[in-house]
Amino acid sequence: MREWHLPVRVEALKVLVSGYQSWSEAELRPLTDVQARPAMAWRHDQGHDPGFLPSGLGGVWRSHTLIALVRGDGGGWVGGVLDATRTFAQWETRVEGDGVQVTRTLEGPEVPVVWEETADVTAAVEALAARLGRAMGARQPAPLRVWCSWYSYYRDVTLDAMLENARLARERGLPFDVFQLDDGFQADLGDWTRPAAHFGGHARDLPGPLRELGFTPGLWLAPFLVGPGSQLFAEHRDWLVRGPDGGPLPVGHNWGGPYPVLDTTHPDVLPWLRELTATARAWGYPYLKLDFLFGAALPGVRFDPTVGRADAYRRGLQGLRDGAGQDAFLLGCGAPLAQSIGLVDAMRTGPDVAPYWDDHTRRVWLGDGTAPSARAALHTSLSRWYQHAWYQPDPDVAICRRELSLLSAEERGTVAGMLDVIGGLRASSDPIRMLDEEGLNLLRRCLEVSRTDRPRTLTRSYGPAVTHFTRATFNLTDDWQDGQPPHSVRGPA
Ligand code: 9PG
């Protein structure tokens, strides 16, 4: 552990933090604000790092890998690490006495740490992120444009729905590169090669027709998870990370209950993981969305107790990369961020988008900012703008349809503006037949690949995030700000 004491006026400071994994919040906040901690314990495993939770306290801010303190003049302090392959770096800033106490803890092997004062926090954060990206061999492929089944069909997706959308996308001349089948095709978590009855076919039936239509086939997997009712669970109970009681460690709560996770330090698990992605590849899927990856890094009892949890995670991810091949495109999701650099091509950098602006009750009253909403996705991805140096950022899908959506035209445009500023992967989940002329035009705009933008200031923001970019200003608050309506995006003015 290392500590620094800064004798500064805390009222004038803001703090830039980034949560542990894709779905955890990243924020830009006055240092004296409260960092929310979800009231529900199951969110601690599934949305955060249970080994280093958000503080839940006023004036105490926790961040993973990188942190920054911003003064009113745009200068301040930046902290970060230059290696995250086997180490979690945990930063905390705490208002104490007449200043700020900064603490940095490493979980895992020692790594080079940077802590510096700077006249330009934006530039220093970008430079530090770029150094980490280079040190870990960040993969930086060209942005892809992806249609994904999740945000319209959810678990009820069928082979026919996939094919109908792919055909319509081709007919309408929509410039998608990838058509990606999401959760719902499989019999159970872990039983990836057996289809779900409702799917109306097998995942391997899809790539052929998609290729004929000119699209690259993509597939979702949650490769580390094991459904408690699955064949994998019944056959390999000894492959699971265990809890303090010796039984399988519940990793989170989804799919109607808790689910365990594979222990990547068990000698039989890595070959199984390699075979899984090799199989998906052999079915014809060079694009894989690898989801719920955080599970492999949870604190728990593992087969090999000498392997740290960051290391355990990275071994698992390496196995998935080895099976898929160097030329596969891997999108990480629900994943420890920095620990994935160099192994994934793209990474979800925020919670799920939803066809509504905010989940106010869950966010404000339950302290859970990881709940799906357009606002949460914007807020988090914008505050992680610098992570384009680590992978291609995926701020999640645009929502262009008007049916089955509560988003206003203004709010749909704000999501589109965020995609432009982030300049990463472009995705949509809208059923193509639901899009009228207006919807199709917005979708075409959302699929236009762009250059990553930079913040023009971190000292001002409209909401608890980085909102002022050189090409656009976002108002994430529920009030007008300097003549700009709530939930809107505008040119720099
Ligand atoms: C499929 C979905 C989609 C989506 C992913 C992920 O914390 N949670 O309870 C939680 C549940 C689902 C979720 C994210 C968080 O969505 O982000 O794109 O692939 O899984 O099940």
Image: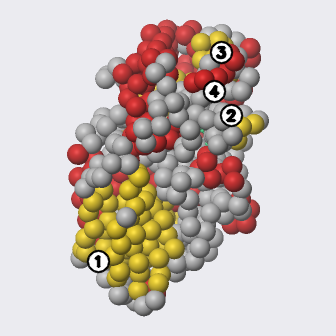
Q: CA distance from mark 3 to mark 4?
A: 11 Å
Residue 185, x across and y down, in percent: 64, 20
Which structural element holds mark 2? loop
Q: Quadrant of the C terminus?
A: bottom left
Which structural element holds mark 4? loop
**Is 440 positioned to the left or the right of 322 in the image?**
right
Nearer-the-camera pick, 97 or 444: 97
Q: Nearer the viewer, mark 2 or mark 4?
A: 2
Q: Residues within 10 Å of mark 4 (few under 14, many from 20)?
A: many
> For the residue marked with disc 2, what is the amino acid?
Gly
Residue sitting at the far right? 256
**Badge 4 is on which residue?**
226
The quadrant of the rendered image in which ligand 1 is seen is top right
Q: CA distance from mark 2 to mark 4?
A: 14 Å
**Badge 1 is on which residue?**
75
Mark 2 or mark 4: whose residue is earlier in sequence? 4
**Badge 2 is on which residue?**
247
Q: CA distance from mark 2 to mark 3?
A: 15 Å
Image quadrant where residue 436 sits: top right
